[in-house]
Amino acid sequence: MSSQGSFDRELFAAAAREIVARQPGGRPFTPLDAQVAVAEALATHRRVIAVLPTGSGKTLGAALPFGLGQLAPGQMVYRTPLRTLTSAQAKTLGADIDGDMASARLGLPWNVRQQTGATPEDPDFEETATVTTFDQALSSALRISYSASVRRRTVNAGAVLGSYLVADELHLFPHGGGAPSRRTLWGSCARGQPGSASSGPRHSIRPP
């Protein structure tokens, strides 16, 4: 999909059709322009903010570059502010991406797990794709996670900060009094692997 700094959009679209389940009516998947733009930015090691409306394909836009093996980290930590969103995004990633095809591309099993207080499926952040809340990821990065033993906390911090980090629905955090928390979340992104979605320095993608 990319070589010597170039990005082949047609090759990316063809690869995306292979790993994304067919659409209603049996139609093959065709990536949207915004999804291709995200993949192109990440392929050139930029961090990305995608400001797109609901239903515009943000989840797949963030996950496809990872699922296609385009990014260096072998793990994705997909973070949301709410448990309900965590459940919904985990279902989307599990249903919309063909696990066998993604596994072949990654060289790793495409296992999607949730990690929340209510659904602690991956407390050690060991799976290929972990969908979690911001507080779970941030407490692991800061080595204060209650879900891990004291001895495991450094391992959890390395797993989170060494992953491809996706930050979803950041606009749900309040302005004003919530600004310090938001800055902390941005800081956790900036310490992740190059290409982490929703962090800075950043490449901004907005709808036309």
Image (cartoon, rainbow, N blue to C red):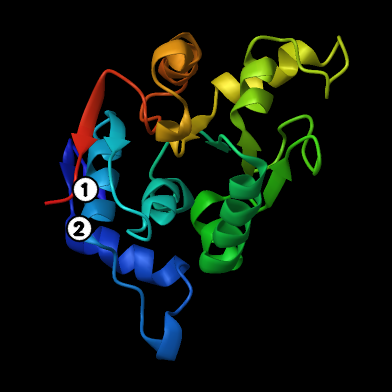
Q: Which residue is mark 1?
A: 37
Q: Position of residue 182 (x, y in %)?
A: 45, 17
Q: Position of residue 6 (x, y in %)?
A: 15, 42
Mark 2 lies on a secondary structure that is: helix
Q: Position of residue 195 (x, y in %)?
A: 36, 30
* Amino acid marked by disc 1: Ala
- Quarter assignment of residue 139: top right
Q: Residue at x 56, y 34 (%)?
A: 81
Along the line of sight, the residue nearer the viewer: 64 or 202: 202
Q: Is residue 30 above or below residue 196?
A: below
- The answer to the question of whether label 1 and label 2 lie on touching residues, with beta carbons closer than 8 A, is yes
Q: Is residue 37 above or below residue 99?
A: above
Along the line of sight, the residue nearer the viewer: 56 or 5: 56
Q: Residue at x 46, y 11 (%)?
A: 177
Identify the residue at the far bottom of this view: 25
Numbered-mark total: 2
The residue carrying pointer 2 sits among few (fewer than 14), some (14 to 19) or many (20 or more) residues within 10 Å by Cα, namely few
User: Could you tell whether 6 is left or right of 105 in the image?
Assistant: left
